[in-house]
Amino acid sequence: MVLKQTKSLCPVCGSILPADVVEEDGQIYIIRECPDHGVSKHLYWSDAEMYKKFDIFEGIGPGIDNPQKEAAKGCPLDCGLCSNHKSGTLLANIDLTNRCNLACDFCFANAHACGYIYEPSFDDIVAMMQMLRDQKPVPAPAVQFSGGEPTMRDDLFAIVKKAKDMGFSQIQIATNGIKVAQDPQYAKDLVEAGTSTLYLHFDGVTRQTNPLIKISKKVIEHCRGANLGVVLVPTIINGRNDHEVGDIIRFAADNVDVIRGVNYQPVAFTGAASADNVARERVTIPDLAERIEEQTGGVIKKNYFYPVPCVLPFSDLVETYTGEPQVRFTTHQHCGAATYGFVTEDGLIPINEMVDVDEFFEAVKNMVEKLNQGEGSLNKYKTLVEGINDMRVSLRNNKISSNTVFWKIIAQTLVKHDFAALRDFHWNAIFIGTMHFMDSFNYDTDRVQRCCIHYATPDGTLIPFCTYNSGPVYREEIWQKYAQPIITKDEIVDPDAIS
């Protein structure tokens, strides 16, 4: 049964082709036919029921008021952000360098493999950040500095400080952790500069799945001393480390004072993968959710996960109450999923067992409708207070005193506009999420047009994540355009040498 029509890519030649997303035997596939390479059929989602449940939360955004290009060639050939793009930037990525202090045999995005250096100047980076802050109607709120290994830059602290001065509320560093593990002062300097979160590559809790586990533990120790939050970022590959997804959550819970969450990234086949590799190693979002339920003994259930745009009612609420445009989580509903777990004396308790999530979202929607009907700030305030009381219908009374804390945080945030209260929420909670980035085997231009994670480039464009890294592969084009010769080789670190 055909569920929708879209456009995709030939996984052999990259041609843009009409495609059908179909349901077969309880799973979702994407099918297209290339005149030169025939029919391609690949798994899109492994659970049709979950796919349809997520469809309910679809939220298509209006795009941005100042797109960089008019749509002319058709998606995905008009990037950076064209007039057909439906979402603003929630998180911007800026590749600071392709240099690295590791020599992983599977990595294609480093200077050694590329044969050249890609490293924008400080002024180039400032110009990229200004472009992000100039986005309308809402400036990009968050930036992640990535690579290569961004800590290879001697001016990283200055870059972070500049980002803070320019108004980014969230500044993240995506890292292998070596520099942080080597020197506890490095984490403190990152915090002093304005870093919010360390995005730590973390593929498992054992040496077999995570050769850097020794380094990872040292990073967490040093970040604890610096009061720097960490998000673990595991790349999940079927048959390689998918058996440890539950252990990763337990590891995070054991270190909740410093680890803010786990953001699983099921493998995307952006390199030279064969169809056999894909069939053997593919993990979809439903697959991951099933493994998490199994490996946490049913504590974090598959049906506890919700798609990213489920939180759109909160944007509507704040926008209606304040009259000011807000960031809108209009990511495609099949790009990612998330839930929260609270670490308590009674163990890890999912937010879904504290609150009826569906009823809670419905209460927020009702509050927005009432606010739209009311007039005057006093009536708005009264409606907001009444709405928060109405939300209590979603409270599950059989779960611990954390409910009191939860509602206190909600009230402080919505009524008093005390957003510092949200930090208390994150301090006691573990974010458990996943983003499944696309490759040429499951590429869907509907998802590209709704992407909220954009790469900023030195030529002044913003490119959706999955277009930058797969499809037309803008990354290679941009890096080669700004390539510099390798003059001296960087020192490669032996992870086992870090004590």
Image (cartoon, rainbow, N blue to C red):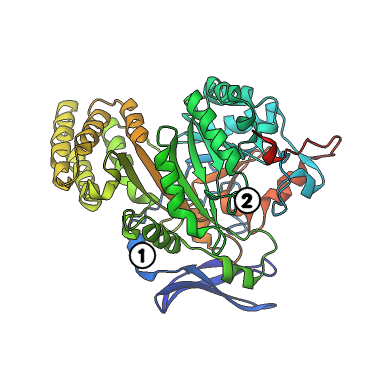
In-image side of 135 versus 112 (left or right): left
Mark 1: which secondary structure? Answer: helix
The answer to whether residue 379 is above or below residue 248 is above
Amino acid at circle 1: Met
Q: Which residue is mark 2?
A: 468
Residue drawn at 52 percent across, 34 percent down = 220
Q: Which residue is mark 1?
A: 50
The answer to whether residue 150 is above or below residue 9 is above
Q: Quadrant of residue 126?
A: top right
Q: Residue furthest front?
A: 499
Q: Nearer the viewer, residue 227 or 442?
A: 227
Q: Which mark is residue 30?
A: none
Residue drawn at 70 percent across, 63 percent down = 272
Q: Give the Cα separation between the discs numbered 2 and 1.
A: 28 Å
Q: Is residue 328 visible?
A: no
Residue drawn at 68 percent across, 37 percent down = 458
Closer to the eye: label 2 or 1 = 1
Position of residue 134 measured from the top left corner of the image (x, y, whole percent): 53, 31
Residues packed near mark 1 inside 10 Å, few (<14), some (14 to 19) or many (20 plus): some
Q: How many marks?
A: 2
Residues packed near mark 2 inside 10 Å, few (<14), some (14 to 19) or many (20 plus): many
Mark 2: which secondary structure? Answer: helix
Q: Is residue 116 visible?
A: yes
Amino acid at circle 2: Tyr
Q: Quadrant of residue 50?
A: bottom left
Position of residue 440 measured from the top left corner of the image (x, y, whole percent): 61, 64
